[in-house]
Amino acid sequence: MTDFDLPAVMELERTMFPDDAWSEDMMCSELAEPTRHYFVACRGEVGGEGEGPVVAYAGLRAVAPHGDVQTIAVDRAWWGRGIATALVTTMLSEAYSRAVNEVDLEVRADNLRARELYRRFGFADVGIKRGYYRDGVDAIVMRCSAPAAAIAATGGGEPGEALEFGDPADTAGDDEENA
């Protein structure tokens, strides 16, 4: 993610998290932090060149030996295409490359699809933050204690490999939603 991506990311942030959206200042502060690593997935032109608009983004805080997934969101029109899977793979690859051997995250207790996605990557429930979200929903704290093993177990591929996608109408599958 770069400053160029920020307007599209902020639009998606406000759409996906209307009650808990980060401010643009918060996101700019995150991008300026050397321990933060943010990624975007863009709509690519199928069979063509170039990138289209941002359809998803994710952020990782990595301070060895520990990391934390700061955020991840996928535009609803693009759910079911493996985008969140690609972003989690990319974040875990980044964590591993920075000598992080434990990655935590918080996920809404009522977001079963995202929780299942994280379980596929070896994340396990390690705690609960009661009333964490503005609407009173609890956050489940999850931890992945072996990022490299999680990538291998899910067939992660190369970092960034699957971060460009075609039209959402082309295919639909069983994937995840924003976390």
Image (cartoon, rainbow, N blue to C red):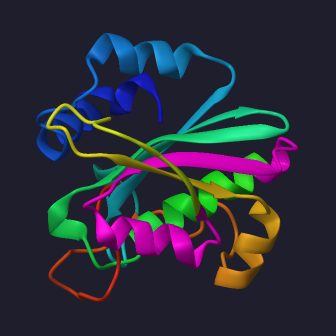
Asked whether the viewer can see residue 151, the reply is yes
Residue 80 point in image, percent of width and height: 29, 79
* Residue drawn at the location 18% of the way across and 46% of the way down: 16
Give 127 or 160, whichever is nearer the viewer: 127
Residue 93 point in image, percent of width and height: 72, 57
Q: Is residue 146 above or below residue 19?
A: below
* Residue drawn at the location 37% of the way across and 27% of the way down: 4
Give 9 or 148, whichever is nearer the viewer: 148
Give 10 or 113, whichever is nearer the viewer: 113
* Residue drawn at the location 32% of the way across and 72% of the way down: 113
Q: Residue 123 colored magenta?
A: yes
Q: Residue 87 colored magenta?
A: no
- In the image, taking residue 150 as reference, residue 61 lies left or right, namely left
Residue 17, image quadrant: top left
Residue 13, image quadrant: top left
Give 156 or 140, whichever is nearer the viewer: 140
* Residue drawn at the location 28% of the way across and 62% of the way down: 111
**What is the number of callouts on the image?**
0
Asked whether the viewer can see residue 160, the reply is no
Quadrant position of the C terminus in the picture:
bottom left
- In the image, taking residue 120 as reference, residue 155 lies left or right, namely right
> Which segment did they paint magenta?
96-124
